[in-house]
Amino acid sequence: MQEFEGRTAVVTGAASGIGNAIARRLAAAGMSIVLADIESGPLGAAAAEIAASGVPALAVVTDVSDAGSVDALAAAARDAFGPVHVLVNNAGVGNRGRAWELSVDDWRWVHGVCFWGVVHGIASFVPGMIASSEEGHIVNTSSMMGLGTAAEGGPYQSAKHAVTALTETLAFDLAEVAPQIKATLLCPGYVDTRIADSARNRPGAPGPLPAANIAAAQPGSAVPVPPEGIAELAFDAIVRERFYALADWDIWRPLVASRFDAILDADSPAPVRLP
Ligand SMILES: NC(=O)c1ccc[n+]([C@@H]2O[C@H](COP(=O)([O-])OP(=O)(O)OC[C@H]3O[C@@H](n4cnc5c(N)ncnc54)[C@H](O)[C@@H]3O)[C@@H](O)[C@H]2O)c1
């Protein structure tokens, strides 16, 4: 997609971190922005900041793990701005722990946001995007942990691997049915955001294990990149219609290559532990 001015984008997880940076980047390109997030205070502030720059912005408090809530988001976006052109399914949360020690609720929470949030976004928005016959682009935020694996990452990594597979199949389906709509799999590595404090937005009682520092997951470097860099990567992928948007690939490639090599050789995966 090359034209952004006057078109509409919906970004989930837009109150913070990567989603917020993507919303600001798309606003800078002239798009009307619908910001969705479960955390209402920062969401309102984020929308006000974009609106102050002269770009139409709408904040919709949304729980992406709830299908009805995402349906309501789609209705609000359509009512405010008409057809949606860019959908960014980005909201995510993380935890960390041994697969057998995490509670079923720990698994459900992470899968509810990271995996079902993307499924709900596709179900609520893509039929309308196809019906409009207009150009479109869908960005799903996975992770380097949606391509590789490491110890103590069961819920997060299995959810992100699912996002990787469902985005690939989404791209195949769109190419067959609605080739005017493209897809991008966004895989950040280690980004300076609030994801380590994910439990702030966990409904109900938190599980027995603390929120994990997912952002501590970078081999070879302790320096997180700013979310604006990931937003630029996502924007570039939309402009160039590139499917894989891989952050800091020189750093992460060996980890991913090692896993793929083990699969191709029918070998056991080399154990990985991230800091
Ligand atoms: N930070 C990293 O190092 C990193 C690395 C790889 C992938 N990611 C992915 O990037 C995406 C954005 O995360 P971030 O790092 O910007 O973290 P963040 O915590 O700064 O932002 C995530 C946003 O999602 C929102 N959210 C949480 N639960 C929600 C729900 N049920 N419904 C709607 N919104 C909800 C939060 O309120 C928050 O505003 C996530 O999918 C995350 O898994 C982050």
Image (cartoon, rainbow, N blue to C red):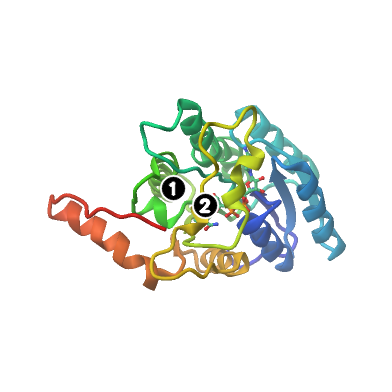
231 to the left or right of 40:
left
Q: Is residue 181 visible?
A: no
Q: Secondary structure at mark 1?
A: helix
The residue carrying pointer 2 sits among few (fewer than 14), some (14 to 19) or many (20 or more) residues within 10 Å by Cα, namely some
How many residues crowd mark 1 within 10 Å: few (<14), some (14–19), many (20+)?
many
Q: Position of residue 234 (x, y in %)?
A: 55, 63
Judge left or right: residue 80 versus residue 271.
right
* Residue that carries the numbered disc 2 in the rendered image: 213
Q: Is residue 125 left or right of residue 219?
A: right
Disc 1 marks which residue? 167
Please provide percent x and percent y for residue 59: 78, 46
Q: Is residue 176 above or below residue 76?
A: below
Determine whether 35 is above or below 113 in the image: below
Quarter that holds the N terminus: bottom right
Q: Nearer the viewer, residue 248 or 220?
A: 220
In three-dimensional space, the C-alpha distance between marks 2 and 1, rounded to whole angstroms, equals 25 Å
- Residue found 37% across the figure and 65% down from its top: 252
Displayed quadrant of residue 273: bottom left
